[in-house]
Amino acid sequence: MAHIAIIGAGLGGLPTAYELRHLLPPHHQITLISDSPTFTFIPSLPWVALGFKPLESINFP
Ligand SMILES: Cc1cc2nc3c(=O)[nH]c(=O)nc-3n(C[C@H](O)[C@H](O)[C@H](O)COP(=O)(O)OP(=O)(O)OC[C@H]3O[C@@H](n4cnc5c(N)ncnc54)[C@H](O)[C@@H]3O)c2cc1C
């Protein structure tokens, strides 16, 4: 069994974790480590800054 640790749950880390979970057999363990309890979709931050979107719409646990 492999235990894969992904450090950083941003635009690179979060999709990588989901993709590996999808591709690998279930006996392999994947741990996603973040310094933040929430994910923010960074490319949409300008829309929040300009008032076109609320922060909650691009943020999730
Ligand atoms: C305003 C803005 C708009 C953008 N628009 C686009 C766009 O339209 N298209 C595009 O392709 N790119 C865009 N980008 C660039 C894109 O957001 C970055 O290329 C992308 O986020 C990089 O992904 P990453 O996973 O390397 O880093 P990040 O997404 O920054 O993720 C790094 C993660 O690591 C975490 N972390 C940091 N230190 C630690 C630690 N010590 N322990 C645990 N976790 C840690 C952080 O909290 C963060 O969640 C934009 C960037 C900005 C700022």
Image: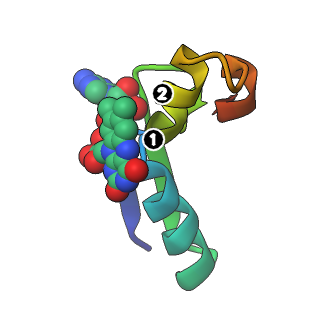
Question: Which image quarter is the N terminus in?
Answer: bottom left
Residue occupying image coordinates x 49% and y 51%:
14
Q: Position of residue 60 (x, y in %)?
A: 69, 31
Label total for image: 2
Q: Is residue 57 above or below residue 7?
A: above
- Residue for point 56% across, 18% down: 50
Of the numbered discs in the image, which one, if any, rests on residue 4? none
Residue 27 x %, y %: 59, 74
Q: Residue at x 61, y 77 (%)?
A: 22
Q: Quick one: 23 or 52, which is closer to the camera?
A: 52
Q: Which residue bears the numbered disc 1? A: 43
Q: Dots 2 and 1: beta carbons under 8 Å? A: yes
Q: Ligand 1 shows up in which quadrant of the image?
A: top left
Q: Position of residue 35 (x, y in %)?
A: 40, 21
Tell me which corner region of the image, top left, top right, bottom left or bottom right, holds residue 61: top right
Residue 53 locus on image (x, y percent) = 70, 26
Q: Which residue is mark 2?
A: 46
Please tell me whether mark 1 sits on a helix, a strand or a loop: helix
Q: Is residue 33 left or right of residue 41?
A: left
Dot 1 surroundings within 10 Å: few (below 14), some, or many (20 or more)? few
- Establish whether ligand 1 lies closer than 8 Å to the Cβ of label 1: yes
Which residue is more in the foreground, 36 or 46? 46
Visible residue check, residue 57: yes
Counting other residues with Cα less than 10 Å from the Cα at mark 2, is it few (<14), some (14-19), or many (20 or more)? few
Mark 2 vs ligand 1: CB under 8 Å? yes
* Quarter where residue 55 is shown: top right
Residue drawn at x 37%, y 60% is 4
Secondary element under disc 2, as helix, strand or loop, is: helix
Horizontal placement of 57 versus 19: left or right? right
**Marks 2/1: CA–CA distance:** 7 Å
